Amino acid sequence: MRSVKIIYNRISRNVNDTIRNVAIGAGLVGIGYGTRPFFEKQSEESEEKAIKATGRAVDPKTRTFTDEGKSIITDHEKKIGIPLKRENKRIMEDFYSGMSDSRDDSITIGERASNFTLAHELGHRQSDYSSNPIASTTKYTYGKNPIPSLIRGPALIAAGYFAPTTRRALAYGATAQFLSHAGTLTSEHLANRNAMKLLEERGQPVDGSIPREQLTGYVKGIAADGAIPIGIGIAAKAVTQNPHIRDFLKRKIENLRSIKN
């Protein structure tokens, strides 16, 4: 009876561990996907706050830059001594944020964007032309670079799968995720700093909570994106390393081989 009880407890423990870790993995995947609409809403609310503080960069009726927006661009061009081509200043319909692209030296601003966002995207451009090596190299290490994006997902799945414990999987995965986005976060911080300085020089100082919320949004988004592959790795490990499931799969594979032979 004692041996039966020991076997039962061992099986029960393995099943419970599998269920727990699968639930943790599934929960992380759910958090990664489920929080995206919430973060998007937060981003829109932050942009509305920035509009109240600094004004709109684009006139929604004419869909052209406001006089103040044009003035910010002009001051930026004077500051770095390199003008933006007219066709490289784009406006995106019904969009709250903006983008800067060093490949064609362009900025794209949403028609619902604030002057702070405009200054922020120009801040990225200022970093691109900076003599500071840290600032100037961020355009090569930004998260949109396709090479680290291809490596990042499988690496995070591996962290979730091969880490000895679930706690370590989370620690290793989070560390890898944020290290792989170090260039992005550095670039965003420098762009915020450049934006605040540009607006301050124009006599329009910006409350520090605006750039903090902007950077915090990036941090939250990076964490949520990392949770998905880490969760997949944890759940996959829980299933494949359960001895009963492993033995079942092994028998199935052996049966298929025997049929094939």
Image (spheres, rainbow, N blue to C red):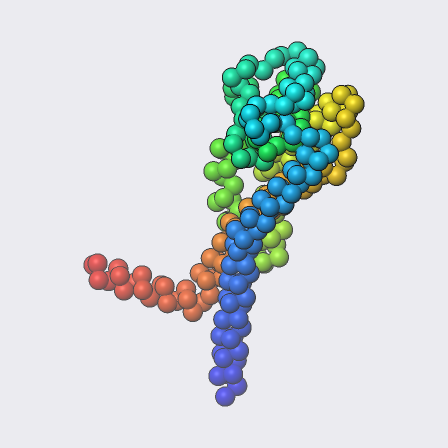
Along the horizontal axis of the image, is 3 left or right of 55? left
Q: Which residue lies furthest to the bottom in this view?
A: 1
- Is 178 above or below relative to 19? above
Which percent across, then down, holds residue 201?
A: 77, 21
Which percent across, then down, holds residue 115?
A: 67, 28
**Quadrant in the rendering for residue 214:** top right
- Is 231 above or below relative to 54? below
Front residue of 131/197: it is 197
Front residue of 199/159: it is 199
Along the horizontal axis of the image, is 156 left or right of 258? right
Q: Which residue is drawn at 67% across and 18% down?
A: 71
Front residue of 104/52: it is 52
Q: Which residue lies furthest to the top in this view?
A: 81
**Quadrant in the rendering for residue 63:** top right
Q: Which residue is drawn at 47% across and 57% down?
A: 236
**Residue 46 visible:** yes
The quarter of the rendered structure image containing the C terminus is bottom left
Which percent across, then down, holds residue 170?
A: 60, 53
- Is 189 above or below relative to 198? below
Along the horizontal axis of the image, is 120 left or right of 107? right
**Quadrant in the rendering for residue 60:** top right
Front residue of 17/86: it is 86
Q: Residue at x 55, y 48 (%)?
A: 37
Along the horizontal axis of the image, is 206 left or right of 126? right
Q: Residue at x 49, y 79 (%)?
A: 7
- Is 147 above or below relative to 129? below
**Residue 123 visible:** no
